[in-house]
Each structure stands twice: as structure tokens, then as C-alpha cells.
Image (cartoon, rainbow, N blue to C red):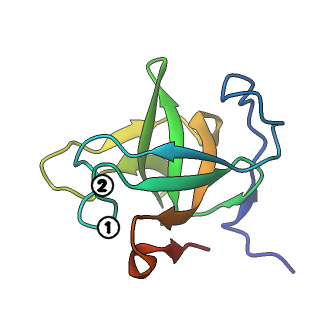
Amino acid sequence: MTNPKTIPLQADLADHGGCANSEPFALRVLGDSMEPEFKDGSIIIIDSAAAVKSGCYVLAMVNDEYIFRQLVIEDGRYMLRALNEGYETIEVSGLNAIRGVIVQRSGTRRKYHKHYN
């Protein structure tokens, strides 16, 4: 039986460098909105086929721009929250905004590597 809060993700990522929609891909974090967990310049691995659930880190499309945030689902509302308190929480209409789930963080040192479920 699957967790009812876990939803398979079907995303269209045709513009992410030529990878097939189901292939993970990497992006570099720009800015400090997701610090301290994700520092500016770190590399994140995004899986467009991963299951989406509240609390996971996601790549989303908001106002025709990609944004990296933590997804919070509460009382039927979908919010994208920055870890840095200096940034606003953005409410989205649903999971249609989600383009992928962050499954790994990489860095210049082995101790900075981390996997997310």
C-alpha cells in the first residue's frame, strides 16, 4: 500500500538540457534562499519521476520561472517554503507546478554529499 500523501510526479521537462523526461539531471543552486541546507553554488540532483510528498525539496515553475523550495502541503493548500526565513512562502494551485524532486545534494567535499527520500 502506498502512502496517500505520496503522489507520482509526471512533469514536462523538455527544456532541461536534452535529458529524457524520466532521467535525473543536475542544477547548481543560485542564491541563499535554501540555506543552511543548500548553500549557494552547491549541486542538486533532480528526479522528475520521483514521488512528491509534503516536506520534500522540489523544483517548481512559478510565474514562468523555475524556483527551488521545500513543498509543504497543509489543509489542502500547496506552499513552497524557503529555508532562509528572509524569503516569502509562495502558495501554488497544486502539484502541477512541481517539475521534479531533489534527491541528492553534492558538493566539493564528500561530507557535503547527501541523499533525500
* Residue that lies at the very extreme toward the left in this rendered image: 86
Residue at left offset 15%, top offset 55%: 85
Task: Count the marks.
Answer: 2
Badge 1 vs badge 2, beta-carbon distance below 8 Å: yes
**Figure quadrant of the C terminus:** bottom right
Mark 1 — residue?
A: 37
Residue 17 rendering spot, x and y as whole percentages = 68, 28
Q: Is mark 2 on a helix, strand or loop?
A: loop
Splitting the image into 4 quarters, where does residue 35 fall? Answer: bottom left
**Figure quadrant of the N terminus:** bottom right
Q: What residue type is labelled 2?
A: Met
Mark 2 — residue?
A: 34
Judging depth in this view, the residue of 54 and 100 nearest the camera is 100
Judging depth in this view, the residue of 94 and 83 nearest the camera is 83
Residue at left offset 34%, top offset 39%: 90
Give above or below for 74 relative to 82.
below
Residue 92 rendering spot, x and y as whole percentages = 47, 36
Residue 9 rendering spot, x and y as whole percentages = 74, 49
* Residue that lies at the very extreme toward the right in this rendered image: 1
